[in-house]
Image (cartoon, rainbow, N blue to C red):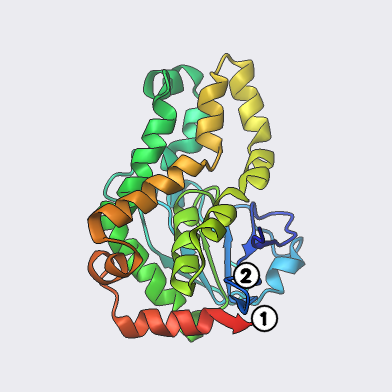
Amino acid sequence: MQTARAVPAATVVNLRDLGGIALGRDRRLRQGILLRSGQLSEFDPEHDMAVAALGIRTVVDLRTADERKWAPDRLPPGARLFVADVLGDDPGVAPARLRALLCDPDGAAAVLGGGRAEELFAQTYRKMVLSPGAAAAYRAFVETAADPRARPLLFHCATGKDRTGWAAALLLLVAGAPRDVVRAEFLAVNRAVRAAFGPLVRRFLDEGGDPAIATAVIDARPRYLEAALDAMDERWGGLDGYLRDGLRLPPAVVERLRADLTVPV
């Protein structure tokens, strides 16, 4: 199954161009207009010329205010920042606290032990679909992505797998991708995320941390995406209802984005 192209980057984690993903026999995603990544707090334009060369016009930051405060983005030259805080109405949830949890094995065990880690992440994915605050953030994200003047656009959270994962899934669904294509792209980030967090995970384990907690926190798992898709289907009857009644997006915005995203093979 084809997934997004990894963009070589020395100072940006998990940078991927969604362009090129096949949507069927005769359509694919347009290249070079929508990219995903982890946070840009370590971005160094002098040592990451490949990133600077992408011509990014807009960076959409899906993180909470605390995350942005402690690890502010360093923007590519000429880019503007757009904040779409997905978890702002519940900033204590696990994706926003990933690094903190991995730095505190005892605290992680108290909050996430006994199999609670995977359950908490699955619940968070439902919140990303169902909560009013998340809906407002994803609506703003889609409206921005649909504006040709905002592209090329890079969107990210902390690691580029949870909030960013649902954002990428949403774009793929809008473009008409089958759900198996959406799932493949969602899971394809695991290698990059595991590599980026390897030292932190090893320290967590060396200090007595539970390996089951570490993997549940670090991995993009099929159950997480399914929790979001199930929430969308149960509450709104699928993608169209979610876009119309959940995100309250004008049909013209969705149609413009769908037309701009796809090109013939």
Residue 39 visible in this rendered orientation of the protein:
no
Q: Which residue is mark 1?
A: 265
Viewer-proximal residue among 83 and 94:
94
* Residue count near mark 2 (Cα–Cα under 10 Å), binned few <14, some 14–19, many ≥20: many
Viewer-proximal residue among 192 and 105:
192
Viewer-proximal residue among 4 and 183:
183
Give the farthest residue toward the front.
Answer: 25
Q: Which mark is residue 112?
A: none
Residue drawn at point x = 74 percent, y = 54 percent: 10
Query: Three-letter amino acid code at disc 2?
Result: Ala
Residue drawn at point x = 44 percent, y = 19 percent: 109
Q: Is residue 90 left or right of residue 59?
A: left
Residue drawn at point x = 64 percent, y = 62 percent: 4
Residue 110 visible in this rendered orientation of the protein:
yes
Please report whichever mark, 1 or 2, sits nearer to the chain's N-terminal start: 2
Q: Which residue is mark 2?
A: 22
Separation of disc 1 and disc 2 at Cα? 8 Å
* Residue 191 x %, y %: 67, 44
Residue drawn at point x = 64 percent, y = 51 percent: 13
* Residue 258 x %, y %: 46, 79
**Are the residues tagged 1 and 2 within 8 Å (C-beta)?**
yes
Q: Is residue 136 left or right of residue 262?
A: left
